[in-house]
């Protein structure tokens, strides 16, 4: 099942990393934050429908053409992955990716500025390799 896009956003909705393996979309930079805005809007809607005392979170959504998977860390980093509609839920794999790749290669990187208000792009070669491995794992025959 193909992975069309892989995005990482900070708590302010700024795109820190983007990988789109099937096309050159450098001219579509403005659309990056729309992924985050859509997820935040759906999250607010889910919270509004929550029963009193309940807590709903946005897990993702699906259309007839694609599926969007969403994982938000306790620190506010969001991972948004767009895939084929038949791809099963990737949240467990995203949680594993967060713990084993993002924390290891980004958060623990002494050259990376971590914190609210920082929008430093993620350029760690080890992180890029981990994203590529994640994408390849989702694409049969590669």
Image: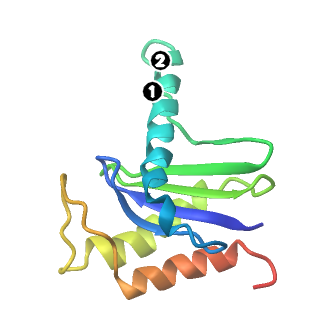
Q: What element carries label 1?
A: helix
- Report the colour scheme: rainbow
Please tell me which residue is depicted at 68% across the width and 53% down the height of the picture. Answer: 89
Separation of residues labelled 2 and 1 (CA atoms): 6 Å
**Image vertical order of residue 127 relative to residue 64, above or below:** below
**Image vertical order of residue 29 relative to residue 71, above or below:** below
Q: Position of residue 82 (x, y in %)?
A: 63, 56
**Residue of label 2:** 48
Residue 10 image label? none
**Image vertical order of residue 48 relative to residue 141, above or below:** above
**Residue sitting nearer the eye, 114 or 21:** 21
Q: Position of residue 103 (x, y in %)?
A: 35, 70
- Quarter occupied by the N terminus: bottom right
Please tell me which residue is depicted at 80% across the width and 43% down the height of the picture. Answer: 64
Going by the picture, which residue comes out furthest to the top? 52
Quadrant of res 17: bottom left
Please tell me which residue is depicted at 50% across the width and 23% down the height of the picture. Answer: 45
Quadrant of res 3: bottom right
Q: In this view, does 81 lie to the left or right of 108?
A: right
Q: Where is residue 142 in the image (x, y as percent from the top left)?
A: 75, 85
Going by the picture, which residue comes out furthest to the front? 27
Label tally: 2
Circle 2 Cα neighbour tier, 10 Å, few/some/many (<14 / 14–19 / ≥20): few
Please tell me which residue is depicted at 50% across the width and 59% down the height of the picture. Answer: 28
Q: What element carries label 2?
A: helix
**Do the CB atoms of the residues marked 2 and 1 lie less than 8 Å apart?**
yes
**Residue sitting nearer the eye, 87 or 20:** 20
Q: Position of residue 42 (x, y in %)?
A: 52, 31
**Residue of label 1:** 44
**Residue sitting nearer the eye, 123 or 126:** 123
């Amino acid at each position: 099942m193909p992975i069309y896009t892989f995005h990482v956003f900070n708590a302010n909705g700024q795109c820190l990393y983007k990988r789109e393996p099937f096309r050159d979309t450098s001219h579509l930079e403005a659309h990056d934050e729309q992924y985050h805005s859509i997820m935040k809007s759906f999250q607010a809607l889910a919270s509004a429908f929550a029963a009193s005392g309940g807590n709903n979170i946005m897990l993702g959504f699906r259309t007839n053409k694609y599926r969007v998977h969403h994982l938000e860390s306790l620190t506010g980093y969001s991972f948004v992955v767009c895939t084929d509609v038949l791809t099963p839920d990737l949240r467990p794999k995203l949680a594993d990716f967060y713990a084993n790749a993002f924390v290891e290669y980004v958060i623990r990187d002494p050259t990376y500025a971590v914190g609210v208000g920082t929008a430093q792009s993620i350029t760690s070669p080890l992180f890029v390799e981990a994203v590529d491995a994640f994408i390849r794992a989702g694409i049969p025959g590669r």
